[in-house]
Image (cartoon, grey):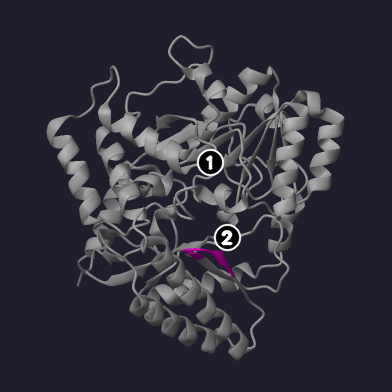
């Protein structure tokens, strides 16, 4: 007797029939292949109605929680009076640009776009234009989007570290050749390259915290050294704060470090899940992108009213004095709980993170660069997360991926998650 396919199976089969692989982004097809039909606050619900405490959080955007009512209302109010106009200025985007300039140390002016990839693409084009140079420096393990200049050397196999590791066919060889990949936190390596090729380097770009490989915290002297070197050689310093911007403070992680770049890219959490990104920085640089300037910048959906309204609402909530303390306290509660668990079970594991970000590596420290993370037990890492999913705790089951806590999470959510983690780790010890 034939069985009826579950609702999830039906949706998956329909998607796979009409969408390559059944997903619209390369990172979305994972095992287990679940279909989520509702997201609310700290929770996801699948097509069969099962609830999961969500720590994947779409790679980080819903900082306040899914479908936050204040954000949704402000976006709806904006769309009730105006949608895409495509000409002139708008009051909302002017207000948002001012807010970002008030909070972000590097922001003298702001350009809005729709994704982190667009923002980093624009930042690198601008850097090449103002310097007249072609080469850039990025760091192993840092991800800056899917365009040719930077789509390489993220989670590389050991035999690809130290050489170009492009992640896609069809990338221009010239772009790959003009991107120099160096180890993160290794200032001496950067000094050597700048000494030899400084007159050819347009920009140094880095994730201020390489969150695309979990959490590798930067050394203060490393970041300050990059600032000093780029100033000395008249190159552009770009902080990719697509993940860290707003999540680690309204001033980004750059404010915590006290180092100011020339340009900063932001996306993900700045509009709590609405598609919005920004390139911010020195006015003299960004003015090259003005209408009639020598660097072209455009986009039909740039500064979409719904996204801009959502971002303004997000900022207002984050400006409340209890928002970041609550968020960071939950992160500390999770990391401390996991650390105690690792010690109790005698596991070769390390808890990492910052603020609202956490993850459990299955390796021992130190963790200062991507090369250190080659020691992580990837099989155990993914097995652990799949076991958590079975217990209703959703952490993306992909090696090295970070987890995110939102303002919608509660201490009870953290405690429930820790109890599930303890049960899984007990089976490992």
Viewer-closest of 15 and 4: 15
Residue at left 74%, top 55%?
158
Residue 182 among magenta residues:
no
Q: Up-down: is 289 above or below 339?
A: above
Name the image quarter holding residue 182: top right
**For the residues carrying marks 2 and 1, which lies nearer the camera in this image?**
1
Kindly identify which residue carries mark 2: 214
Q: Residue furthest left?
A: 80
* Residue 67 in the figure: left or right of residue 330: left
Q: Residue 253: give x, y in percent of width and height.
A: 55, 51
Q: In what element is the residue under mark 2?
A: loop
Residue at left 53%, top 17%?
288
For the record, the magenta segment spans: 352-357
Q: Residue 180: give x, y in percent of width and height.
A: 74, 36
Residue at left 67%, top 51%?
156
Q: In what element is the residue under mark 1?
A: loop
Within 10 angstroms of label 1, few (less than 14), some, or many (20 or more) residues? many
Q: Residue 265: give x, y in percent of width and height.
A: 51, 38
**Which SS type dominates the magenta stretch?**
strand
* Residue 307 in the figure: left or right of residue 199: left
Q: Residue 113: give x, y in percent of width and height.
A: 40, 31
* Residue 235 in the figure: left or right of residue 84: right
Residue at left 39%, top 68%?
326
Viewer-closest of 95 and 387: 95
Kindly identify which residue carries mark 1: 105
Q: Up-down: is 25 above or below 93?
A: below
Q: Up-down: is 414 above or below 57?
A: below
* Residue 145 in the figure: left or right of residue 395: right
Within 10 angstroms of label 2, few (less than 14), some, or many (20 or more) residues? many
Q: How many marks?
A: 2
């Amino acid at each position: 007797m034939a069985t009826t396919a579950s609702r999830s199976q039906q949706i998956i089969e329909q998607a796979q029939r009409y969408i390559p692989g059944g997903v619209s982004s390369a990172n979305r097809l994972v095992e287990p292949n679940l279909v989520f039909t509702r997201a609310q606050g700290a929770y996801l619900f699948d097509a069969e109605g099962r609830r999961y405490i969500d720590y994947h959080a779409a790679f980080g955007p819903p900082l306040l929680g899914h479908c936050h009512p204040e954000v949704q209302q402000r976006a709806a109010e904006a769309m009730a009076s105006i949608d895409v106009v495509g000409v002139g200025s708008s009051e909302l985007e002017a207000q948002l640009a001012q807010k970002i300039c008030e909070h972000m140390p590097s922001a003298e002016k702001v350009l809005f776009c729709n994704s982190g990839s667009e923002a980093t693409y624009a930042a690198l084009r601008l850097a090449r234009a103002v310097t007249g140079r072609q080469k850039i420096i990025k760091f192993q393990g840092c991800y800056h989007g899917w365009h040719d200049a930077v789509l390489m050397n993220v989670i590389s196999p050991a035999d690809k570290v130290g050489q170009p590791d492009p992640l896609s066919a069809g990338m221009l060889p010239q772009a790959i050749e003009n991107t120099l990949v160096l180890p993160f936190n290794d200032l001496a390596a950067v000094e050597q390259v700048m000494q030899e090729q400084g007159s050819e380097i347009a920009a140094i770009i880095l994730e201020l915290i390489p969150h695309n490989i979990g959490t590798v915290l930067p050394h203060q002297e490393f970041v300050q050294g990059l600032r000093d070197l780029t100033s000395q050689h008249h190159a552009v310093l770009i902080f990719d704060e697509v993940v860290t911007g707003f999540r680690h403070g309204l001033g980004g992680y750059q404010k915590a470090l006290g180092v100011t770049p020339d340009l900063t890219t932001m996306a993900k959490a700045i509009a709590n899940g609405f598609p919005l990104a920004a390139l911010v920085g020195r006015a003299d640089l960004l003015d090259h992108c003005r209408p009639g300037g020598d660097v072209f910048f455009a986009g039909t959906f740039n500064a979409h009213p719904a996204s801009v309204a959502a971002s303004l609402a997000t900022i207002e909530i984050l400006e409340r004095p209890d928002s970041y303390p609550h968020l960071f306290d939950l992160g500390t509660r999770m990391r401390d709980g996991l650390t105690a668990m690792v010690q109790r079970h005698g596991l070769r594991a390390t808890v990492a993170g910052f603020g609202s970000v956490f993850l459990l590596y299955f390796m021992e420290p130190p963790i200062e660069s991507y090369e250190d993370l080659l020691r992580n037990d990837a099989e155990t890492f993914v097995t652990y997360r799949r076991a958590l999913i079975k217990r209703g705790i959703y952490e993306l089951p992909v090696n090295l991926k970070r987890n995110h806590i939102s303002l919608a999470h509660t201490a009870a959510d953290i405690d429930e998650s820790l109890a599930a983690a303890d049960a899984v780790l007990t089976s490992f010890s």
